[in-house]
């Protein structure tokens, strides 16, 4: 319970003041490189951090 609250607090803190480290999510540490390789993101904040990167990539095609 307490750890969940702490985690959320950390998340919103990252949202409010995104430390835009180049190509790295400030919350989970996911990298732009990893997005390019795996087409996956680590956490909801990644969608915000990498929004411009994601927008330039085509959607993964369903197989
Ligand atoms: Zn993330």
Image (cartoon, rainbow, N blue to C red):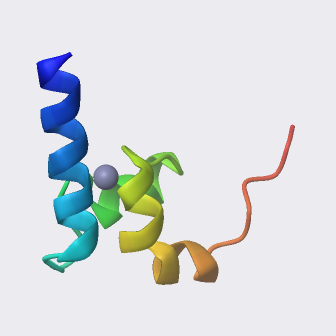
Location of residue 57 by image quarter: bottom right
Q: What is the quadrant of the C terminus in the image?
A: top right
Task: Please provide percent x and percent y for residue 52.
Answer: 49, 84
The furthest residue to the right:
63
- Location of residue 58 (image quadrant): bottom right
**Quadrant in the rendering for residue 54:** bottom right
- Choose between 28 and 7: the one closer to the eye: 7
Left or right, residue 40 beside residue 45: right
The number of discs equals 0
The residue positioned 36% from the left and 72% from the top of the image is 49
Q: Residue at x 81, y 52 (%)?
A: 61
- Residue 52 vs residue 15: left or right? right
Q: On the rendered structure, is 52 left or right of 23?
A: right
Whole-percent x, y for residue 30 in the image: 26, 52
View extreme (top): residue? 1
Give how far across and how far down residue 37 sits, in percent: 44, 52
Above or below for 30 versus 15: above
> Could you tell me residue 21's position as x and y percent?
13, 77
Q: Is residue 2 above or below residue 58?
A: above
Q: Would residue 25 be seen by someone viewing this image from the given angle?
A: no
Residue drawn at x 53%, y 51% as measured from the top left: 39
Please name the residue shown 60% across and 83% down the image: 56
| Closer-to-camera residue (29/12) | 12
| 50 vs 12, nearest the viewer | 12
Q: Can I make out residue 3 in this image?
A: yes
């Amino acid at each position: 319970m307490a750890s969940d609250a702490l985690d959320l607090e950390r998340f919103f803190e990252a949202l409010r003041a995104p430390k835009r480290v180049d190509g790295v999510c400030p919350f989970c540490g996911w990298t732009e490189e990893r997005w390019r390789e795996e087409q996956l993101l680590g956490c909801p904040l990644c969608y915000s951090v990498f929004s411009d990167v994601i927008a330039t990539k085509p959607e993964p095609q369903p197989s």
